[in-house]
Image (cartoon, rainbow, N blue to C red):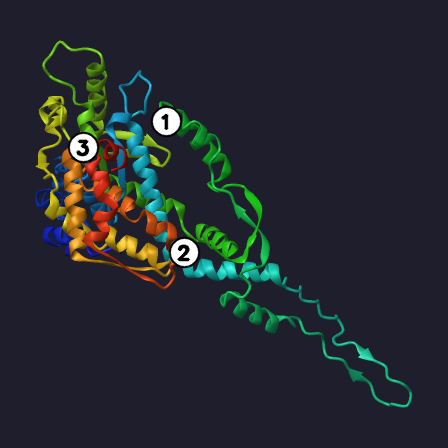
Amino acid sequence: MGLRDPRSLTPRAIVEELDRYVVGQRAAKRAVAIAVRNRWRRQQVAPELRDEIAPKNIIMIGPTGVGKTEIARRLARLVAAPFLKVEASKFTEVGYVGRDVDSIVRDLVEISVKLVKDEEQAKVRARAREAAEEKILDILLPRQAPQAPHPMGPRPIQLPASMDSTVHVPPPQVDGTAGTREKLRELLRAGKLDDREVEISVAEPQHGVFEVFSAPGMDQIGFDIGKLQQMFSGGRGREKQRKVKIPQALELLTADEGQKLIDMDKVTAEAVFRAEQAGIVFLDEIDKIAGSRSGGQGGPDVSREGVQRDLLPIVEGSSVTTKYGVVRTDHVLFIAAGAFHVSKPSDLIPELQGRFPIRVELEALGGDDFVRILTEPENSLTRQYQALLATEGVRIEWKKDAIAEIAKMATLANERMENIGARRLHTIMERLLDELSFEAPGLNGSEVPITAQYVKERLDKLLEDEDLSKYIL
């Protein structure tokens, strides 16, 4: 999905775009569409009022598998915004084992830097590709150093006495390989040199010590050491010799040359700005840190409330130091989500509740929804399996009665067991096509119609045996 003019992203246009990938859940789509449009509106407001307008954070309430994460993920792609999904349950109160909540902001900025860097590299990719080609050609056919001209001009050659004149020999060709080089270039672009191996020198990605100290609970140590590592290395990893085939060499060298062509200071500044003004953080499983507010309870509830209090400054708006500079979270959009089976949003501490003014409830999915999920979205499971098996030369055709039968079985399985929403379809489809997927390499050129009878033959017995279906479906 490419970048779009923000002015064209009206709430209606955003909802229509989300409809291509997520079935139903109109209320949730409208809420996120308005929140995103308000960001654009805020940028049009006079500067003195702009900083006073805070984002309207959202809590999505609904069972698993109804589209909460997918709505947020597709929204971030649509607006080309830095997007981070984290599980609230993996953070713990300061002083306990677990991740520091400030790592949310650091991770968001890292994603933003990669996003902007990829955009800048895409702009210079053509130039980087040309430079990479030249390097490959230099390896295959090293350039000849031009010979210095004789100080007295062309050297005369004395002919035998029988000839009474002196002739001048023209200087040697400086670049007699130009024609060969162009022929090699043609072969390279045509892919006829793809099997050849070359030895190239590229900068290594910077990992090492920083990655070792990025374990849970050690984010700040990792950040400090990473900053020192970046300072001493000048922003680039050390050069490393690698022996690879030409297609891979071209990609590695193109990335390396692209890195040299972009201004990392400009990338960093834009990335920090985008994280602050357009960043989206999806806090999943927020219900897992909502303790009962009946009072007088200790144990896990103490730690849960501690996590909420640690999250509060980030959601309210605070400054977090990262290796790219100080990042403010005042205008980051937070979308929280949870099933809230045991707890409820009112079990969150009042201060955190107040920072999520918009609450939308997502509906549980039924048989009709499953039929739509299997047929309407551009990335529907039926299209995915058709594309996968087409690579083996097997064409599958989904009949309407088969889709209806799959939807019916998914609904029944969700009623009998844990309701996992649309995720049940993945399990059922995998079981349904298990044999066909295994035998596909030997069925090249065949066409397989998937009918209701086909579905029943393979899944009825599983659904009838409740004990077995609990393990398989």
In the rendered image, residue 109, in percent from the top left (x then y), is placed at 31, 38
Which three-letter amino acid code belongs to the residue tagged 3? Answer: Met
Vertical side of 129 occupied by 407: above or below:
above
Cα gap from disc 2 to disc 1, whole angstroms? 47 Å
Q: Which residue is mark 1?
A: 219
Instruction: Measure how far apart labels 2 and 3 are at the Cα level.
Output: 35 Å
Disc nearest the viewer among 3 and 1: 3
Badge 1 amino acid? Asp
Closer to the N terminus: mark 2 or mark 1?
1
Q: Is residue 371 visible?
A: yes
Residue 280 visible to an observer of this rendering: no
Report how far apart the C-alphas of labels 3 and 1 lie in the structure. 39 Å
Q: Nearer the viewer, mark 2 or mark 1?
A: 2
Q: Which image quadrant for residue 428?
A: top left
Query: Looking at the picture, which amino acid does disc 2 mark?
Result: Pro
Image point (31%, 42%), residue name: 112
Q: Which mark is residue 417?
A: 3
Residue at position x 28%, y 34% from top? 327
The quadrant of the image that shows the N terminus is bottom left
Label placed on residue 441? 2
Q: Are marks 2 and 3 in contact (CB under 8 Å)?
A: no
Residue 252, horizontal then vertical, whole percent: 49, 52
The quadrant holding residue 159 is: bottom right
Q: Are the residues tagged 3 and 1 within 8 Å (C-beta)?
A: no
